Every structure is written in structure tokens, then in C-alpha cells.
Amino acid sequence: MTGSRDYQLFLLAQMHAERQASKALTFLSATRGELESAKARITALGLATPGHSVDLYTRLLGPPLDVTTFHSLSETGVFANSLGLRFHLPLWPELDFIVNQTTEGMAWGWTFVRSRGSQPPVITSLRDLTLWSLVVGDFKQFEPLEREDAWNHWESRWLMIPLSPGGPVRRCLVEFDFELLQKIHDPEDA
């Protein structure tokens, strides 16, 4: 039976934080073989195909915790009046997973966001950055986060951040999958 566990494994298969993914497999009592099998099952359902129905998510994850309307998007076009469906995935207890839905019922724009009532960790320096505990929205004090590159669910952004509390500020490249922090590059390499 395909469900939430398989979907979480599917997400893991696409993430770049190897150490966190390995820990997550242990948490789910899953092997790499099970991860690959789950990825194949989810892909066969059509979730890797652009323009798939948002109904696939409710079949896998159950009803959303919440549904909100986007007001910041263009008044016209395919994304106008889109909805955000919020789901909770046990691997990320402080976060929720948002699947956006067009008025025609097609899914787009998958992101992790902070769960309602969950406070983001305090970020004062590079030392405070912890993989899988921060989402793009947690970096507001460092805006603008200059986008370096982006493709599908992955993106890299430049961040100006002190190396230590009160220390010198450096430009650092950070990577996200589904807006969840995956990798921090050495600022000296940036």
C-alpha cells in the first residue's frame, strides 16, 4: 500500500543532504532498496509528471491540515487564485509540506514551511545553520537571498552571514530542496 511513508521516501530520494537522508531511513526503518522501490511506486502514480492532479497527494497523505488561497500571485494566468494545501510529514516534526493547486486541480510548487506555532531557530551566525531544521522563510533577517541557480525542487542561494556571532560577514552559498536547507558551502569557497 502506497501512502505517507512511501511519499516521505520519495522526497528523501530527491534530497541532497546525504547524512540526514540516512538518519531518516533509520527513523522510517527503511533500507536504500525500499527507498528506491517507493520512489518507483510514487513515480508510477504520476507525481513526477508535470501537470499531475493534486488529488494524488490527498490519496497518499490524507486530507490537508489546512487550505489557504494565495493572494500574492498574479491576478491572471494559470497560477491565479491557487490554493496551498498543508500536510504534515512525521520526518519533519517542526515543518509542514505545502502542495500548491491551480484552480484546475493541478499540483505545482512543493515547499516545506514552518508548522503553525513552531518557532524558527535563532540564527546569529553560520554556526547556527542546521540542515533540515531551516526553511527559506527562516532567513528573513538576511534578505535578500540572492538566487544563484534553481531547477525543479532544488535551488541555491547566496547568503550574507557572520561566520560567528558578532564576527565578520561573509558571502555563503546554501542549497535547498523543497525550500528545506540541504547544504552549506564553505564561505571561503564562495
Image (spheres, rainbow, N blue to C red):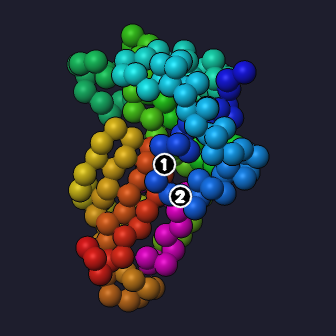
The residue that appears at 45% across and 85% down in the rendered structure is 165
> Residue 119 colored magenta?
no
Q: Which residue is mark 2?
A: 18
For the residues marked 1 and 2, what is the alpha-carbon distance in whole angstroms?
8 Å
The residue that appears at 63% across and 56% down in the rendered structure is 22
The residue that appears at 34% across and 38% down in the rendered structure is 152
The image quadrant where one finds the C terminus is bottom left
Instruction: Tell me which segment is drawn in magenta.
Output: 124-136
Q: Quadrant of residue 143?
A: bottom left
Q: Is residue 21 above or below residue 13?
A: below
* Labels in figure, total: 2
Residue 118 visible in the snapshot: no
Q: Amino acid at mark 1?
A: Met
Q: Which residue is mark 1?
A: 15
Residue 104, percent from left and from top: 39, 10
Residue 12, percent from left and from top: 56, 44
* Residue closer to the observer: 13 or 180: 13
> Residue 127 colored magenta?
yes
Residue 27, percent from left and from top: 73, 51
The residue that appears at 50% across and 25% down in the rendered structure is 43
